[in-house]
Amino acid sequence: MNAEELKNIKERLEKTIQTLESQTNTLKNDLNLIKEYLAKPDQEKNSQGEQFVNELKEQAHNTENQIEINQGLLQKLKSTQTESTDSKDYYDRLGEEAISLLQRMKDKVSQQEILSELYRTVTPASKESDKEEKTKEEPQAPPSDPKADLEFEKKLQKFEEEDALAALKKKMGIK
């Protein structure tokens, strides 16, 4: 991670904090308006119905909960923002996360290689029998079978995954 990426992350973090602060302030204002309405005499509220009042009380409770959640997120984001990115612990943690990510990618690639190898060992026999069938039979439109369509989709997805795997290997420099 270079300085520019860190700067971009910091800017996104600041924007997130600003958005959360704005939402929290809006929620507080809404809550105050609801509390003012609920504090009015019953004569003024009767015209709007008891159900509306109950909905407002529920929304007021939900708003209070969201304010608490937002304040917790703000505190967490602010503490993360103030954490120094120059510290050794920060880079150690980033290194560990990168190594963990690479290990997961390596495991996934090896799993795909095993599946690919298994596929290669199973398909040669079927390719030969397919060629013989094609030369003997006239081409016909396949019957519409949902099960066969599903199997075809799975095979197609497997081929796409193999292509993606090959591209990933090429990017990573793995043979």
Image (spheres, rainbow, N blue to C red):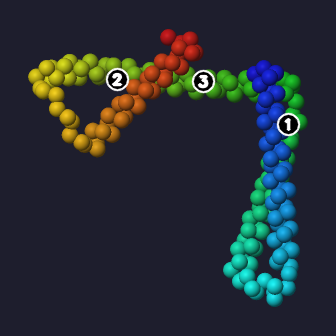
Residue 97 shown left or right of residue 64 in the figure: left
Kindly report the distance in space between the C-alpha atoms of the residues bearing marks 3 and 2. 24 Å
Establish if 59 lies above or below 38: above
Query: In front here: 53 or 157?
Result: 53
Closest to the camera, between mark 1 and mark 2, is 1
Query: Where is residue 94 drawn, in percent x and y?
Result: 74, 26
- Give the farthest residue toward the bottom: 43
Q: Which residue is mark 2?
A: 119
Q: What's the mark number on residue 81?
A: 1
Query: Which residue is pictured at 45% across the width and 27% down the height?
Result: 161
Establish if 124 lies above or below 50: above
Residue 52 shown left or right of residue 155 in the figure: right
Packing grade of label 1 (10 A; few <14, some 14-19, many >=20) is some
Say what amino acid the circle numbered 3 marks.
Gln
Q: Which residue is mark 3?
A: 103
Kindly report the distance in space between the C-alpha atoms of the residues bearing marks 1 and 2. 49 Å
Residue 97 shown left or right of residue 8 in the figure: left
Say what amino acid the circle numbered 2 marks.
Tyr
Packing grade of label 2 (10 A; few <14, some 14-19, many >=20) is few
Query: Which residue is pictured at 65% across the width and 26% down the height?
Result: 100
Query: Which residue is pictured at 24% across the width and 42% down the height?
Result: 144
Establish if 133 lies above or below 68: above
